[in-house]
Image: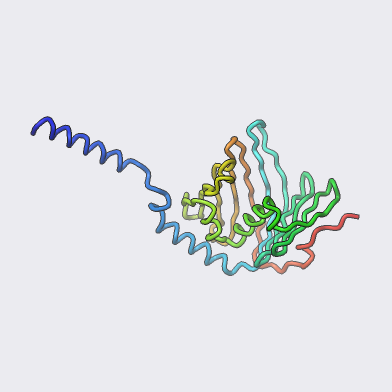
Amino acid sequence: MGARMRKTRFFAGLLLVLLTSLPFSSDAGQQPALTQVFERLQAAAQSTRSLTSDFVQEKQLAIFDEPLISQGRFFYRQPDQLRWELVTPIASGFVLNGRKGQRWNSLSREVSSFRVDSDPMMGIVAQQLLAWARVDIDWLKSRYRITLLAEQPVRLQLFPRNQGEAGFIEQMQILFAIDSSHVTQVEMFEKGGDKTRLRFEQVQINQLLAEDIFKAPEFR
């Protein structure tokens, strides 16, 4: 065998090794498994008419050793009613009814109205919470590149597609319950090293919710 032929085979073999050792594209390589997982999650969510839970929010700032912890409650009723309420350390929150909402803060004792169409920040927060509660896979896929970290229980990894969001969010991870009926944990990793973890506890599905749950409190 000539030197040129041996050299050609060497580089061809090296190229094959490199190609087979590279990770597959998450979108392409995981597509069959992801599709099945999405179908399972959406099927489980179809029967969810309402959802309530307590939550613990742990904010780990890069400049502090100890996390900042707050607690609250979350309520959802289909198709688009939300109540997100922090109880400690400072009572605050918001309610959403369709495109309109109200937010409050116990320190200022004020209630203000907003619309998700004209308040981008509240719009993003409301859309995120609705997407988790409804398991709105189409909305999530439009905003994130999704990879599958585990199938049982389902754990998804999300990378922002939007340049604005990608500027400060590195990735998110969403963990579902064993029966795929609801989200049990959300982790957000920021570019600067900060990390936020939301743990949903005491989850109840399809409980009858009073109408005043989706109204802001009255401060006297």
Q: Nearer the viewer, residue 124 or 76?
A: 124
Instruction: State the residue in front, 140 or 119.
Output: 119
Residue 70 in the image: x percent, y percent? 72, 45
Camera-side residue of 200 and 19 = 19
Residue 160 percent coordinates (x, y) = 54, 48
- Residue 42: x and y in percent read 53, 64
Q: Which residue is drawn at 72% across and 64% down?
A: 97
Q: In this view, does 136 lie to the left or right of 119?
A: left
Snapshot quadrant of residue 180: bottom right
Q: How is this picture coloured?
A: rainbow
Number of numbered discs visible in the structure rendering: 0
- Seen from this angle, which residue lies furthest left? 1
Q: Name the residue at 72% across, 55% down.
A: 84
Does 171 appear above or below 11?
A: below
> Horizontal placement of 181 versus 146: left or right?
right
Q: In this view, does 149 lie to the left or right of 61?
A: left
Q: In which quarter of the image is the N terminus?
A: top left
Depth check: give the residue in front, 194 or 41.
Answer: 194
Q: Which residue lies furthest to the front in this view?
A: 118
Instruction: Specify the quadrant of the image occupied by residue 13.
Output: top left
Residue drawn at (52%, 56%), measured in percent from left and top?
Answer: 142
Rendering quarter of residue 192: top right
Q: Where is residue 220 in the image (x, y as percent from the top left)?
A: 91, 55
Q: Which residue is drawn at 75% across and 50% down?
A: 86
